[in-house]
Amino acid sequence: MKLTFRRYDLRLRHTFTIARGSSDIDPVIVIEVEHDGIVGLGESAPSGRYGESVDTVEKFLRSFDLSMFTDPFQLESILAAVDGHAEGNPSAKAAIDLALHDWIGKRLGVPLYKYWGLDPSATPVTSFTIGIDTPEMVEKKVREAEAYPLLKIKLGGENDREIMKAIRRATKKKIRVDANEGWTAKETALERVKWLEQEGVEFVEQPMPAKDLAGTAWLRERSPLPLIADENCVRLTDIPKLQGVFDGINIKLMKCTGLREAFSMIRTARACGLKTMMGCMIESSIAITAGAHLSPLLDYADLDGNILITNDPYDGVRVENGRLVLTDRPGIGVVPRA
Amino acid sequence: MKLTFRRYDLRLRHTFTIARGSSDIDPVIVIEVEHDGIVGLGESAPSGRYGESVDTVEKFLRSFDLSMFTDPFQLESILAAVDGHAEGNPSAKAAIDLALHDWIGKRLGVPLYKYWGLDPSATPVTSFTIGIDTPEMVEKKVREAEAYPLLKIKLGGENDREIMKAIRRATKKKIRVDANEGWTAKETALERVKWLEQEGVEFVEQPMPAKDLAGTAWLRERSPLPLIADENCVRLTDIPKLQGVFDGINIKLMKCTGLREAFSMIRTARACGLKTMMGCMIESSIAITAGAHLSPLLDYADLDGNILITNDPYDGVRVENGRLVLTDRPGIGVVPRA
């Protein structure tokens, strides 16, 4: 098996601001795993929140010797070796996981949803994210998002009320809120959550800092809206301790090391009585399409990373009336844009 | 998709006695799912402990209309419909799950271990079960089990010490003990567990009645041996509540409705810090081989149901020096005995 990779700079449609910072360009790493005449495609979209950058991803991929394995079908052993190679590096690990799944799907001649036994007509509607901005820009972005019936907005700062007012001036659509750990005091979080319920919000993601599980449990007892864990739910083993603290989890391929762990996270979350959502980073159609193949299993999808960029190098999953529409091509099933 | 089934009476090598009762013949139901020129094989081995008999299995299979589905690949939707068709009936549901997996493996041309990304060289040693009997017969059975390095014995009654004495007269092999809920008082259970540790026992399965979780948690705090849940762990959703009560779980296809749920149970148990074991009923090589394909993921295997019978209609997984040896044939990969 031969692994090659290249950096690719995704250009954002709008400067993207969340509680932690802003960016115009998001670099990702596109990888290829070649074996026996078949090429599997993968992608790493590193996030500083999880200690990664394109440099750490490149370092990880350079130092891991995939050529010691001779059969891409041995996902369990290979991915255990990848995971054990170094702590952290979740998106670098995800890139290999994606490429191996793509390879297997191509070898078997089936798209990943079929490989996993899923019904492609059962995909959910994906939300479309509106980044933090001036009230004027937020209103403009909401109008641009006309095609998407379900919005996600990033709150968690001082001007939450202004942003929401701007959104509600522009639309009555159902809204999901991501606070990205922005409300540090539990009383503030409760006040915001109660207010958001009045504003027609469906749920709130990660209202409080990940380190404050006790505060979040306090909030959940009083919250009129479901709370979804994002920064608090990185990998499979985080899930059991979220029972009674959150109502659901946001799974991201780039946090959890890839598709194989994501599938297990969906099952384990259900067993723990938690709803499942899949989110994403700013990603090309490679990673978004990979995640979308799992989406028939989800309660909620937020797979819009590829819609927020202007230079997506691949075609894959599409969005029609807000709903994810999977490709029937084998593996992840993306093809280079014409 | 066309489903047909037939009853088959498995003849036991020895009258089989556990804490709940005895038997000489164990009837199972062999099923076939035919679609697009491929036949998937499955098996149901009903247990009265879970409210089933060959009659209830036949009734379930007659009343479920599999012909409403047109694609065996749609495991998720089909198995949800099967599970929702009636409460209980886990082994009837497992038969359909097995047949669909066999069909998919045959269609894709890969054995199930490969379909799941597993390493066939990572299979564990299986234990070989010695049923409750007179001390003389126990000693005879232990000698007959010479080829198996790891024994499992059924205790949980008044003559536990006599049985163990007979075993230890015949062998020094590592032993696993299954009490099948036999010790109703927690003090008795603790006394037996402490004694068994002295006797070179590896772990104890289901020491106390399933309804006494508090007693089992009390026992675990004091037990020198790991405790494995059997009757307490039927399906996926049972797992999270076993944290802190048991050290591991015994998954059986005939309790949990089949391979798809079993795979998720293995992942969820790990996430909950529990060891995983796969056990079985008295089953032919169809169901034993199906379970064995998952065994590279297990900590412990007790897949000997097909060894305990004299008229196994199929050839599949083999046991060499105690270790499970998988077949490379597509699907479950069993073939009729010559």
Image: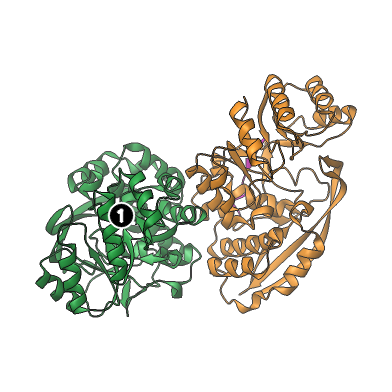
Chain colours: A orange, B green
Residues in magenta, as a range: A322-329
User: Element type at marker 1?
Assistant: loop
According to the picture, the residue beneath numbered tag 1 turns out to be B206
Mark yes or no: residue B35 visible. Answer: no
Which subunit holds the residue at mark 1? B
Point out the image quarter for the N terminus of chain A: bottom right
Q: Amino acid at mark 1?
A: Gln
Judge whether residue A326 is colored magenta.
Answer: yes
- The vertical placement of B186 against A151, above or below, is below
Where is residue A178 shown, x and y percent of the image?
A: 72, 36
Left or right side of A56 for B30: left
Residue at 81%, 40% in the rendered image: A18
Left or right: B128 in relation to A285: left
- Residue at the spot x=15%, y=57% of the render? B158
Q: Is residue B316 magenta?
A: no
| Nearest to the observer: residue B231 or residue A40 | B231
Rendering quarter of residue B130: bottom left
Relative image position of residue B218 (x, y in whole percent): 37, 49
Q: Quadrant of the C terminus of chain A?
A: bottom right
Crowd class of label 1 (few under 14; some 14 to 19; many from 20; radius 10 Å): many
Magenta segment, prevailing SS (helix, strand or loop)? loop
Residue beneath the point at 70% across and 67% down? A32
Q: Nearer the viewer, residue A337 or B179?
A: B179
Residue A208 in the image: state x and y as whole percent.
71, 37
